[in-house]
Image (spheres, rainbow, N blue to C red):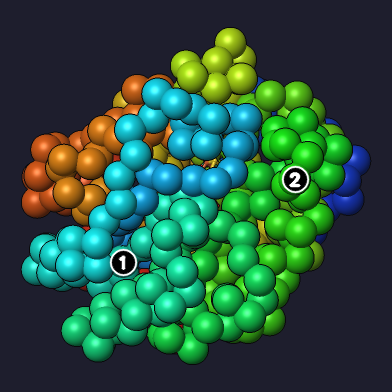
Amino acid sequence: MNNLISLVDKLHLENHLEKKEYITLIKAFDNTQLREYLFTLSDKVRQENYGKDVYLRGLIEFTSYCKNDCYYCGLRCSNREAERYRLSKEDILLCCEEGYSLGFRTFVLQGGEDMHYTDEIICDIVRTIKEKFSQCAVTLSIGEKSKESYQRYFDAGADRYLLRHETADLSHYSKLHPANLSGQFRQECLFNLKEIGFQTGAGFMVGSPYQTVENLADDMLFLEKLKPEMVGIGPFIPHHATPFKQEKKGSVELTLFMLALVRLALPTCLLPATTALGTADSDGRQKGLKCGANVLMPNLSPVTVRKKYLLYDNKIALGDESAQCVEQVRRMVENAGYKAVISRGDHILHR
Ligand code: SAM
Ligand code: SF4
């Protein structure tokens, strides 16, 4: 036990562990004493950097079309059952208006890789949002693009970009994706985003098919190297119309453990308690906040499309209307002992 505690202390002090040390810790994730020690420390580190603040981001899932065929995702192009929709620029602006009046100062535009939205269209949408809501940050999460495209989005005013690396191990990556997608290109995209100046988000699913403890250790080392400003981590949850429909869902306990390790390795990162965590366990997001997470992303998409953006089965939808959804999220944050704040919620080094 002392050995495990001293590894947690080392990660806290040095923000780094060797691969074999990460493996030792991750293998012991269900040890109650270790978990208590780690979670107390990760909550403390998050409070030292961000106090009790929890940043709310308004998530706009603006397209369910995707040209890719990731084996785990309900939006994959081979899923003929998926209902597809696209929001127009006007629809997106309406979501932002509503979000702004509800107190959001960050809008996250997320979608499949949908070629309908050319760089021109994306830049026009970003520019218009930034003109109308000048105190707000815009985050994009629209997949792998060329460095030139990323630069154009940045020049149009986008502040942040979320692109989970999914798994740092290239051979594991190839078991989750068809051959036209490569883990190496995805990682290159992330380094390009950082270089351009985006607040960049990487991340991975916990319990994705074929994932090993070694893979998770490699994910930690990759995060140490990239130093992303944001890290999205959630359990894998199967979708009934994908090749992984029979696979087991990821463990909530292990997801919480990984969140806490990330908080110690990257003390200032912005760390969401994800929708997938809230889907796998009805208290998952509160638990996430208590072990180091400090971001929540309530859904601002129009009610008519919410049920069509199905990455996995039984995805939670809090409240029918955005206003209800925000109210529930605020209450959840307060009940967990934290404070939902109205601000852009930038990374400490980007203020
Ligand atoms: N298309 C963009 C991309 O892939 O980066 C953004 C949208 S994509 C749906 C956002 C994230 O959802 C992915 O990075 C993936 O980690 C997560 N996701 C997809 N399918 C999932 C599943 N079955 N369980 C949990 N998370 C999933
Ligand atoms: Fe498309 Fe993203 Fe889903 Fe892959 S994870 S199929 S890129 S929406």
Q: Amino acid at mark 2?
A: Asn
Q: How many labels were placed on the picture? A: 2
Q: Which mark is residue 107?
A: 1
Residue drawn at point x = 57 percent, y = 76 percent: 150
Identify whether 331 is placed above or below 27.
below
Element type where label 2 sits in the image: loop
The x, y position of residue 9, in whole percent, is: 73, 51
Q: Quadrant of residue 30?
A: top right
Left or right of residue 61: residue 210: right
Separation of disc 2 and disc 1 at Cα? 31 Å
**Residue in the foreground of this view, choosing between 176 and 337:** 176
Q: Amino acid at mark 1?
A: Phe
**Residue in the foreground of this view, choosing between 78 and 45:** 78
Looking at the image, in which quadrant does ligand 2 appear? Answer: top right
Residue drawn at point x = 72 percent, y = 71 percent: 191
The x, y position of residue 70, in whole percent, is: 62, 37
Which residue is tagged 2? Answer: 180
Element type where label 1 sits in the image: strand
